[in-house]
Amino acid sequence: MAGHEETFALGRFRLPSGPSFAGVVLGDVVVRLGALTAPRVGRAGVHDIEGLFADWDGHVARLRERVASLRDAGMEGVPPDTVHELTALNVLAPVRPAQVFQSGANYRAHVIDLIMAQQIETRAAETEAERRARAAAIMDERAAAGTPYVFVGLPSAICGPYDDVVLPADGVQHDWELELAAVIGRPARHVHRDEALSYVAGYTIANDITTRDRVFRPDIPGIGTDWLASKNAPTFLPTGPFLVPAVFVEDAMKLQVTLRLNGETMQDASTADMIFDVARLIEHTSAKAELRPGDLLLTGSPAGNGAHYGRFLRPGDVMTANITALGEQRNPCVAEEEAPG
C-alpha cells in the first residue's frame, strides 16, 4: 500500500470459534468493519465488504478519515471487543464473487516462450533469435489489434490465502499461475477503457491453479479446452489475503508478481509485461458480459509456470506468493485422499 497514514486493507476473518466477519486491517491489528463504519457508537454500520459496494468511493473516503484519526488518537471510541490481533485470526478469502473472469495468454514473455516452443518443430531452419523476433512481432500485432482471451471460472474453486490446496487424483500436472486480480466495485457493461479503472474497487492476489493434463479432452480433441476439469476443483483458486482499495495502489501496471515453490523463485515478473492492461481487460469483458460488484477479474499469469520447468505440484509442496502492496499467500499442497472430509 502507498505510504500514507490513512491506508488500510479489507478482509474476511474468523476466530477459532464463531462466525466469519469483515474487518479493516491496520498493520497487525484488525478492527471489525461495523465498528468503523457506524456513524457513532451504538449505531449500526456496514458489517460486510459487499455492503460497501453500494457507495464504495464514499465508504473508502470515510474509512480513510476514521483510520487517520485512530492513528492519531489510538483506539479511543472503538469497542474493545471489535479489535483483534491479526495473528489470532483465521484469514479467509476477502471476497465472495458471483462471477470469476479469467484472462489467459496475457503476459508477453510468457506467450513468447510458448510460441518459441511451438516454432522449434515448425520452423527448425530458423535460428533461435529469428524465432524469438517472429514471436515478438506476433505479440506486437496482438497488442495493437488483437483482443484479450477471457473465460469464466467457478467461485466454488476459491479458498483462503493460507488454506491447503487439494490436488485431485484426476490428473497429475497440477500447475501454479499467480495473478493480479481486480475486484469490480460497480456494475460494468460496455465500459470504455478510458473509464474502466473507475470500476475497480481494489486489488487482491489469486493463484489460478491448472491441471495441465486435463486442459484438453483426448476423446474429443476438436472441441477445445476443458476449463471445468482443469481449473475448477475446490481450493484451486487461493485468493487474498486482503482486498486493497484501488486508491492505495499507485499503479497496477507496475507491481511485481512473485511465486516461490518450497522457497525457490519460479515466477518473478512485473505487471508491466501484460499484453492487455487492466483497463483493456475490463473494456473487453464488459462488452461480452455484465461485471457486477464483487466480481473477480484475473489478469493472467507471467512466465515461470510448472509447465516451463517440467515440474508440477506434489503433496508436501508449499507455494508462497506475493504481489507488491497486496500481501502474501502461503498454501501447502495435499493429496485429495489425504484432505479432511
Image (cartoon, rainbow, N blue to C red):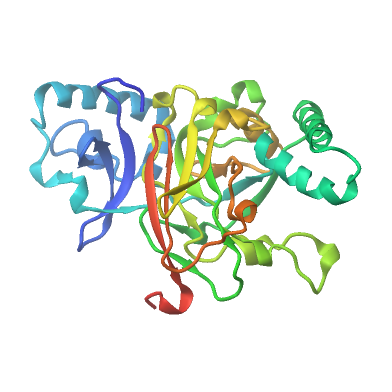
- The quadrant the C terminus occupies is bottom left
**Residue at image location 31% in from the left, 21% down from the top:** 3
- Place of residue 34 in the rendered image (x, y in percent of width and height, measured from the top left): 24, 41
- Place of residue 293 in the rendered image (x, y in percent of width and height, measured from the top left): 50, 41
Can the viewer see residue 178 in this picture?
Answer: yes
Q: Is residue 52 left or right of residue 285?
A: left
Q: Is residue 140 left or right of residue 234?
A: right
Which quarter of the figure has residue 214?
Answer: bottom right
Relative height, residue 228 to residue 285 (above, below): below
- Place of residue 192 in the rendered image (x, y in percent of width and height, measured from the top left): 67, 25
**Residue at image location 45% in from the left, 49% down from the top:** 264
- The quadrant the N terminus occupies is top left
Which quarter of the figure has residue 334?
Answer: bottom left
Comparing 298 with 306, the one in front is 306
Can the viewer see residue 44 in this picture?
Answer: no
- Place of residue 178 in the rendered image (x, y in percent of width and height, measured from the top left): 52, 46
Relative height, residue 272 to residue 238 (above, below): above
